Image: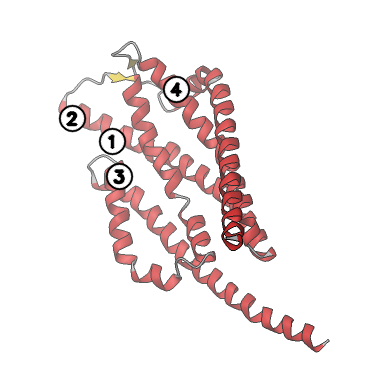
Amino acid sequence: MHVDQEQVQPLTEHIRELRNRILWIVLFFLITFIVSVIYAKDIFEWIRQDSMKGVQLHTFAPGQSLRVWMQIGFICSIVTTLPVILYHLWQFVRPGLRKSEQRAALVYIPVAILLFLGGLLFGYFVLFPYLIHFLQELNQQLGIPEVYGVYDYFSFMLNIILPLGFFFELPVITLFLTRIRLITPQFLGKIRRFAYLALVVVSAVITPPDVISCVIVTIPLILLYEISILLSYWLTKRMEREEQQIPLEEDGLEGE
């Protein structure tokens, strides 16, 4: 019975720690959401003068403007809360890592943030303008007047750029899964064809049904996958060298 209590206690402590970290993340998310909602009008005006310039926007329901307002607050709070999420994740797994692994995992946080922002910027400045231009030309060829609802237009933009932000996290996720030995570079190489097919399907889902836009999204995703394989291979070799050094250090201590 005493052994059972010793086994249960660490588990309850981990659950309590996880709950507390989730509560801190939720609290930070709510605070940043409130701040983002306060400045949502300024953010919307900046987007309107940039990517929505020259587009006539309308509202087709009383609550659409409020939805856009909430979407801006939600996206901004996600971006600002991401570093906090990664930090608490690192703190949660840190006790089970070696010193070298703790330092390596800490490096993942700024890299993950930069990749996420890179995906958002790629979607906003590269992919989204091309798609809008393509769809506007298609409407002109069909002789269809363009009347955009502000909520539909804004939601379409978010559906393009937000998934790219998460897809650009692929290298960091690969490094993390390699570090905890759930995947290997050999495994990633074996499933390469299936991964390519999945990336093509994802690209086709988040883009309009034309080949060029699908290719524009697929190429960087495939490059990220190949970079992930190279990073996984590099990390695996490094982990093997670290494992070889540990027995040597232990033998040196025993010799003393």
Could you tell me which residue is drawn at 73 percent across and 81 percent down? 249
* Numbered mark located on residue 70 in the image: 4
Residue lying farthest to the front in this orientation: 1
Q: Is 67 situated left or right of 178 in this image?
A: left
> Whole-Å distance between the Cαs marked 2 and 1?
11 Å
Tell me whether circle 1 and circle 4 mark residues in contact (CB < 8 Å): no
The quadrant of the picture occupied by the C terminus is bottom right
Q: Amino acid at mark 1?
A: Phe
Q: Which numbered disc, 2 or 1, marks the residue that appears first in the sequence? A: 1
Q: Which residue is disc 1 drawn over?
A: 134
Label 2 Cα crowd, 10 Å radius (few <14 / some 14-19 / many 20+) = few
Q: Which residue is disc 3 drawn over?
A: 213
Tell me whether circle 1 and circle 3 mark residues in contact (CB < 8 Å): yes
> Can residue 101 be seen at all in this image of the molecule?
yes
Label 1 Cα crowd, 10 Å radius (few <14 / some 14-19 / many 20+) = some
Q: Which residue is disc 2 drawn over?
A: 141
Q: Quadrant of residue 103?
A: bottom right
Q: Is 22 situated left or right of 168 in this image?
A: right
Q: Nearer the viewer, residue 118 or 231?
A: 231
